[in-house]
Image (spheres, rainbow, N blue to C red):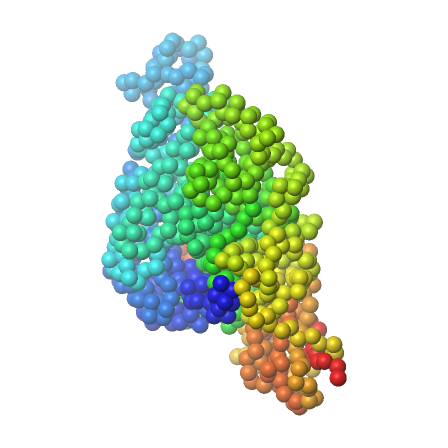
Amino acid sequence: MLSRILNNFSAPGDDSRIMMRWWWFGPAVTDEGIEHQLVLMKNAGIGGVELAVIYPLCLDNEFPGIANARYMSDEFLASTAFAAKTAKKLGMRFDLTLCSGWPFGGPHISLEMSARKLCMREMEIPKDKKEIPLPGLEEGEALLKVFCEGRELSVGNNSILLPKAFGEAKSASLIISSFTGQRVKRAAVGSEGHVMDHYRKASLDIHLQAVGQQFIDAIGSENIHAVFTDSLEVFGSNWTENIFEEFKDRRGYRLEEHLSALFGEATEYSRNIRHDYLRTLTEMLNDNFLKPLQDFAAGNNVLSRVQAYGTPPATLNSYKYVDLPEGEAGSTGIKSICRRAGWKELCPNRIASSASKHYGCKITSAETWTFLHSPPYAATLLDMKAEADEFILQGINRIIGHGWPYSPEQAGIPGWVFYAAGNFNQTNSLYPAMHALSEYLQKTSALLSLGETVADIGLYLPNHDAWARYSAETESLLHYKAMRDHIGHDLFIELLRLGYNFELIDDDLLQEISENKRDGYPVIMLPNIERIPLETLEALKKCTCGKVVAYKRIPDKAPGVIENEKYADNLKKLAKEIFSDPARNTLFIENVSDLESLKSVIKPDVDLKQDEPETGYVHRRLGSSDIYFFVNTSNQNISFAPGFKTARKHALKLDPMTGNIMEYTGAVKLAPYESVFIVMSDDDVETPQTAVFNNRRNIDISTDWDIEFSGSGIRKNMRELTSWTEIEEIKHYSGEAVYSKKIELPELPDESAVSIFLGKPVSIEPFQTREREKNKGCIAFVDAPVKDAAIIFVNGQKVRTVFAPPYLVDISKYVKPGENLIEIKVYNRLTNKLSGEKPHDYSAVDEKYGKRFDFIQDFDALKPFTSGLTGKIELIVESCKV
């Protein structure tokens, strides 16, 4: 097994390469442009695309030969077929988003089939009236109930009937089945229309017939890897046409008799109604959208890839109906100046990766870099690595980059720009170094796809408590956020600090564990659980796989109306029996400060001995080998000696940035945002010999560099290294600058090493990108000596691309005695160029097609970033003293 691990590390398969969301604007594309961009992606180490067709950015023939085709027209379908076939020819995966913009919808979705909501409106009842005419309703709306002072009023003959003439004016509440009114967001030309009802299979059938099947027929399923569904953003959608019947069948009583409980202040009675209502919505999403979508994909011999979170309220169980679970950062609950990727809390990524483990999926992908450093083009490759690593700490092992804008050469630089987040196509001045990040993530993904994840704790999700938190007035039914808020943040942070990893489980999975149908966990934790089904509690009683730990409280309530009527007393009695009997294998931990007591139950998988959870790890097991991936998520240097619970005969350290394989000596030193693999194995292996040098010379080569700013005709000699922004004529320069210098080296002993060190990163205080708002995404808070990526050449030979700490490169194989030419090609951010130019005017496009995006995020605050080599550059010569 160890040989397989090392082979995967040294020669990772193409299926481990990252993919990119490929934005087609308009759509206005040409076959020549499609092929050109796919080749550019492949050259950057990108292994596939996820096609996303969105709003137009040009007028027809604004650029010769380029016009906006209507979405789903023959011309457009021919372009998608050409793209898919070209990708296949290049050995790249091709995934297809089954809509334009998001969510699913378009001109084929009638108002009747569109997303619905339940709402309450107030109206005045005049005094001294026995009946009043019904208020006017919008098309398709239906009045369900009328209440006044807690009393239901009768409706008949187009009037509200009053039991008696009120002596004074009153206010009545009308509960109405209505529509969200949501239209497809960021729609392409011809895809404008209503968002579909995701609880209604008939609505999905119409969409799949109008879009999905036409795509498959035009492209050919043999050219498609998977069909894709983005995060569920059907805002305010909490109702559907046949919910009364579905509710009665699923819950056993009539929802229409309890509608008022879905509004207003929560009581214990109303929480039970709301629980049943939201649980029904989740089940209808699963049965009427996710399951038939998966069936559609299978029927066409492709896979279904879905971000099953958002509104409607999907749960971990929703991924049961997904072939390729996918996560995303989601909204963070920890307030900070920088919106990080959420590895210290409950996020969609963690739910998706847990679902993959439980449902037998080896791959969990994630939409990454969506919330990166703003504005677009401000993100560095180090920012990208830092966020991707945090995703990996949550169990992600395939990165889907967000994203790559299709942009024709005639559009210049930056060309066509997605309005938010990163834009990582050929117009980005960091593109020439992109392959290095891709290769790093390919190696990382390849290793973390082997074997199975190892986690100490199965964390039971508070689905039932989260369902009970909603009301019909909740605008966004973000189920993962309701669960996270119910648990609180401290638990996740403390578990990670102590060195425990956890996976998420639910009722079905816990019951399977108790019946020995799947492997259990050393600890099953109930985090602040209040409501739990009786059958789940009975499963916990039978469970013999490990310790059952209740955190903050012991569950004592049955979820929902019928369950409370039938089982409330039995559940309380059973909960008391389980957690009060010292003979049982249970533990109650009341406060976060007491979680240290878990160590008396089970040692942490890796004891990290840290005061704050800054170092995270992922653990996977393949046979008699263990793969650990450690990440320093902070902007400080970290040194530690991890205490591994599992002992093995051999240990290796694998550097995914350089590809080096070394002997592991028991200590780990990580620079800011650095990562490393430690592989422990009982398999016999020839241990790499680590050279030990006892003689070291540091030669300062920071002065007298010749610099050529490629394509500008500008050449400079820098006596002292400084930022390009300090030179007025290149203050707004973005692109490549070639630093060159000749150095003399003496004859060196055979066992010698020569490295070039570009300087140390210096931590900086977190900052706001704009005074009026917190940062939108992940930023690496270091002042890097390389701004922002560099490709090192020695004597005309390419050595390595550097974009992240430590900025140390071994050049031993490339130097020779005597004169050596060192060339360093440095690439900075495109924001420098853009800050000196007037933003593109899209008013003519807006006038023709309507305003489909507000503005390019933060382009009104562009500024040049410091650029170039700014550290102390040294040549480090090491040898054994003779």
| Residue drawn where x is 65% and y is 51% of the image | 607
Image x and y of residue 448, in percent: 50, 59
Residue lying farthest bottom? 818
Q: Quadrant of the C terminus?
A: bottom right
| Residue drawn where x is 44% and y is 47% of the image | 358
Image x and y of residue 394, in percent: 53, 51
Q: In the rendered view, would you say 811 is above or below 3?
A: below
Image x and y of residue 387, in percent: 55, 57
Question: Along the horizontal axis of the image, is 743 left or right of 213?
Answer: right
Image x and y of residue 103, in percent: 38, 47
Location of residue 289 (image quadrant):
top left
Question: Along the horizontal axis of the image, is 628 left or right of 424?
Answer: right
Location of residue 880 (image quadrant):
bottom right
| Residue drawn where x is 38% and y is 9% of the image | 164
Q: Say how many tags the image has.
A: 0
| Residue drawn where x is 66% and y is 58% of the image | 635
**Residue 685 in view (yes/no):** yes
Closest to the observer: 141 or 632?
632
Q: In the rendered view, would you say 831 is above or below 799?
A: above
Q: In the rendered view, would you say 595 is above or below 126?
A: below
Closest to the observer: 517 or 388?
517
Question: Along the horizontal axis of the image, is 49 left or right of 492?
Answer: left
Closest to the observer: 595 or 246?
595
**Residue 858 in view (yes/no):** no
Question: Along the horizontal axis of the image, is 582 left or right of 297?
Answer: right
